Image: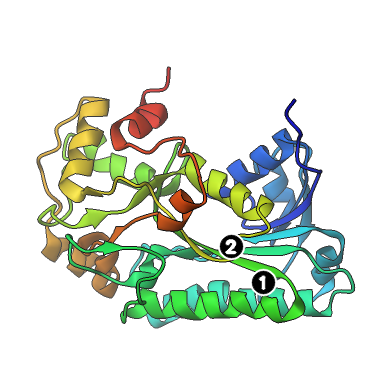
Amino acid sequence: MVISPPMKRVLITGGSGFVGRKLAQALLARGDQVTVLTRDPRRAKGDLPAAVRCAAWNPEKAGAWAEELAIVDVVVHLAGEGVAKRWTDAVKKRIETSRIDSTRLLVEAIGQAKHKPQVFVSASAIGYYGPQPSDKEIDETSPPGNDYLASVCQRWEEAAREVEKFGVRAVQLRIGVVLGDGGGALEKMLIPFKLFAGGPVGDGKQVVSWVHRDDVVGMLLMAIDNPEIKGPINAVSPNPVTSKELATAIGNVINRPSSLPAPAFALKLAMGEAATILLDGVRVMPKRAIELGYEFHRARLVPALESILAPE
């Protein structure tokens, strides 16, 4: 006899986003109640299952939304400005405000709530580790990098861990390059392939630590349910690939050429400092997830791509 976990009341920020939508669906499917905090409840409602409750919030200042934190068991913080764009001063400000400042605001609101959630699961990113040599394996015990994104991730996680002083368990999910249908990194990668101009980025040797969206959701559920889990977890496949291997796999799955590289100089010209996201790599391993017994849905790249691009 399989015993289902007790129903949980879960609050999600970024719940109408690429990962948040799938998490909300998975939570509802197992009988949990889901509330999404969003700037635009009406718009979010159109992107989410009918059973999801949407509540308005402003991630930049305190407000009535804080009352939502007193009536839930779990908070999952996924909201954040995209980083795959030129990092002007204004963009950097939005990146930091949407991640670090919003996390501080949530933690402060949790501290003031009469009833506190049991766990605060916050998104982070493998950018925490910075660019690394392609043959160097990185896990959760590895030190942080020293570039801009690493600095953002360190401050982001530090803000999230502050919730522990209120007796709330804290988990930080360091998410890799998420592959899935209907958005995310893969949607942008596919554009040149559809134009018969696909290929690796730069020299193609940099390592891409990817993860299927189903496994990000799976690790989020594990972090929510297992009271022994706290601290960072790398949400990546145990089988990272090079940019060239990724391009070849995409080309094979959709039957398109994959030999035209995107020149490094052009990416640097277009994206400036942010080109590091595409041109520099890091071989991140999901050591803690494996130790915790997590079973991957899509651990290998070609079957993962086939499930997205050529579903049965």
Q: Is 192 above or below relative to 156?
A: above
Circle 2 residue: 79
Disc 2 vs disc 1: Cβ atoms closer than 8 Å? yes
> Which residue corresponds to the image point at 26% horizontal and 27% vertical from the top-left?
253
Placement of the N terminus among the 4 image quadrants: top right
Q: Position of residue 129 (x, y in %)?
A: 34, 71
- Dot 1, how many residues are within 10 Å of its Cα: few (below 14), some (14-19), or many (20+)? many
Q: Is residue 307 left or right of residue 164?
A: left
As helix, strand or loop, the secondary structure at mark 2 comes to: loop
Q: Residues within 10 Å of mark 2 (few under 14, many from 20)?
A: many
Rounded to the nearest angstrom, the CA distance separating label 2 from label 1 is 9 Å
Asked whether residue 17 appears in the rendered view, the answer is no
The amino acid type found where label 2 is placed reads Ala
**Amino acid at circle 1:** Pro
Above or below, 103 against 118 in this view is below
Q: Earlier in the sequence, mark 2 or mark 1?
A: 1
Q: Quadrant of residue 254?
A: top left
Question: Residue 59, labelled with which disc?
Answer: 1
